[in-house]
Amino acid sequence: MITMLGSPRRTCDGVTRRETLAAGALTLLGSNFTLPNLLAAEAKKPAGTRPGKAKNVILLYLLGGAPTQDMWDLKPDAPAEVRGEFRPISTSASGVKIGEHLPRTSKWMHKAAIVRSVNHKAGCHNCLPSYTGFEGLMPDQHPRESDPPSMGSVCEYLRAGRGDMPDYAYLPCWLGWGQVFRRAGPYAGLLGRRFDPLTSECAPYADKGESPVPGKPSVVRGMPALPNTTFETDLTIDRLNDRRSLLQQIDARAKSLEGDGTIGSYDRIQQRAFGLLTASKMKACFDLSKEDPRLLDRYGRTLFGHSTLIGRKLIEEGVRFVNVTWDLFWDRVKVDYDAWDTHNNNFNIMKGNKLPHFDQTFTALLEDLTDRGMLDDTLVVVMSEMGRTPKINASAGRDHWTHCYSVVFAGAGIKGGTVCGASDARAAYVKDRPVSTADICATIYQCLGIDHESMVPDKTGRPFGIAHGGQPIREIMA
C-alpha cells in the first residue's frame, strides 16, 4: 500500500485533496487476454490497419487549460470580450493562422496539424480523459487502481521486461506535485502499478529576487532528476549487489505466501530501481552538463525547457513514450502561481510568460529532432486537459471550458499543414467535426502502430478497450 500524507489542499475548482491514497497492483488474469496473446494480436493486425509511422511519442502537457482562442483558434471578428488582445498571424502552412505570440511555431505549421474541435463532458481539470480517452464522470480527480490505463502505460505493458530502458517516462514530477494534489490520468490503473511511468523529481525555483504573485508568475527554473539514484557514501557496487540478493530472498519467501500478484509488481519496480543506480544510459539522459550551451539556450534554461531536452534524449535511447508537463507549483514553492490556469490577467501572463517560453521550447524540440533525423520517427503532441471560456471575465481572465478546445500534432504519421474540425464564431462550441479525447488517443495509438481496438485485461480478466471506442483522426494522418 502507498500512503500520501499532507494537509488538505484545494485547486481553483474547489476539489479537496484526500489525506491518503491507497494504491495496489492488480493481477493480470484471464485466459484469452494475457500479454502474450495481446502481443500476438498486435502482430496480426486486421487488413486495412495503417502501419505505425512513429517509433515514439513526446507529449507536451500544458496543465491548467491552455487558451485555444489566444493560441490556435483566434477569432478576430468576434466581439472584443471574446477575441481578446491578440491577433492571428500567417504561418508556413497556407491558410492556417495562429496567435501572434507564437512566431517561431508559425514557421513549423507545415509540419503540424491542429484539431480545433476537441471536447468532453468529464469535468474541468480532469486529466483522465486526455491521457486515457475515458470520459466518464469520476467522484474526484485522484487516481484509482480501477482507472483505465494511460497511453504510456499501455506502451509499457506491451513491451514489459524487454530492454533495459523503460518504455514510459514522466517529467519533471508526478502530475499535480506542485499543488500537493496527485491527479489521475498518467498511470497504469487497472493494469497494475508496475506499468506506471518512471517519474523524475524536481526542485523548481524562481530567479533570485523574484516574488511572484497571482497574475504575475515567475519563470520556473530547475532540472529534473532521476529519483533515488545516488549512492550512500559507503555503498559500493558489491554491497549494492548484496542488498539485491537479500531482497530477492525476502521477496521469494513473500511470493510463496502470497499468490495475488501484488508482490510481483513491486519486484519489477525494485528491479528497475536497482538497475537505475548503475544504468549509465539513463543517467546520461538526465545529465545536461555535457550538452552544448547553445543547445540549452535554444530549448530555454527553464524547467520545461530542460525537461523537454531530456525527453528528446530519452527517446533517442529507446524510451517509447515521454511526457513533459508544464505543472503548477504554488503549494510546494512560490513560483508560477497560474501556470495555464489563467482566471486572472490572462493576456499579460500569456504574452509575458507562457507563450514565449512554450514557443521557444516547442520549436527547439522540432528543430532538434529534424537536425537529428528523428522527426520522421517521433510524434509530438501538445495538449491540455481542457480549454478556456470564450468570454473574458471581469478579471481579464478566461475560466474553465471543456466544450471546445485544440490539440496539436506534429512529426511522424501527421499530415503537416492541416486543420481538422472547426469551432463556432466565438470558439465556444464545436461547429464541425467533433473530436473526443478517445479519438485523440486512438490517433496516437495508430501513429505508433498499436491497433486502437486492442484490449487489455481488467482485474477480473475481462477485456478492456484501450481507446474507449475512439477512432483515429484520418484527416490529419499521413
Image (cartoon, rainbow, N blue to C red):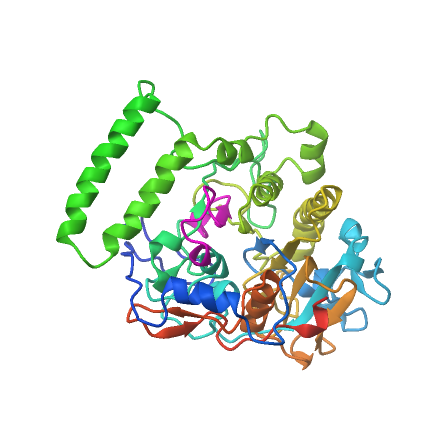
| Residue farthest left in this picture | 257
Tell me if residue 285 comes above or below residue 119 in the rendering. above
Front one among 342 and 39? 39
Near-viewer residue (398 or 370): 370
In this view, the residue farthest toward the top is 234
Q: Residue shown at 24%/57% (left/top)?
A: 261
Quarter of the C terminus within the rendering: bottom right
Which quadrant would residue 16 be assigned to in this image? bottom left
Instruction: Locate residue 355, reporting x and y percent.
Output: 69, 51
Q: Is residue 177 magenta?
A: yes
Identify which residue is drawn at 45% across, 39% down.
201
Determine if residue 197 is in view.
yes
Q: Is residue 5 visible?
A: no
Does residue 180 appear to the left or right of 350 in the view shown? Answer: left
Residue 71, horizontal then vertical, whole percent: 71, 60
Placement of 440 over or under 201, stated as above or below: below
* Magenta stretch: includes residue 110: no
Q: Which span is picked out in magenta?
A: 156-179
Determine the residue positioned at 33% across, 74% down. Answer: 462
Does residue 251 appear to the left or right of 379 in the view shown? left
Asked if 406 appears above or below 288 in the picture, the reply is below
Q: Quadrant of residue 412?
A: bottom right
Q: From the viewer's perspective, is 300 left or right of 221?
A: right
Question: Where is residue 292 shown, x and y percent of the image?
Answer: 69, 28
Number of marks in picture: 0
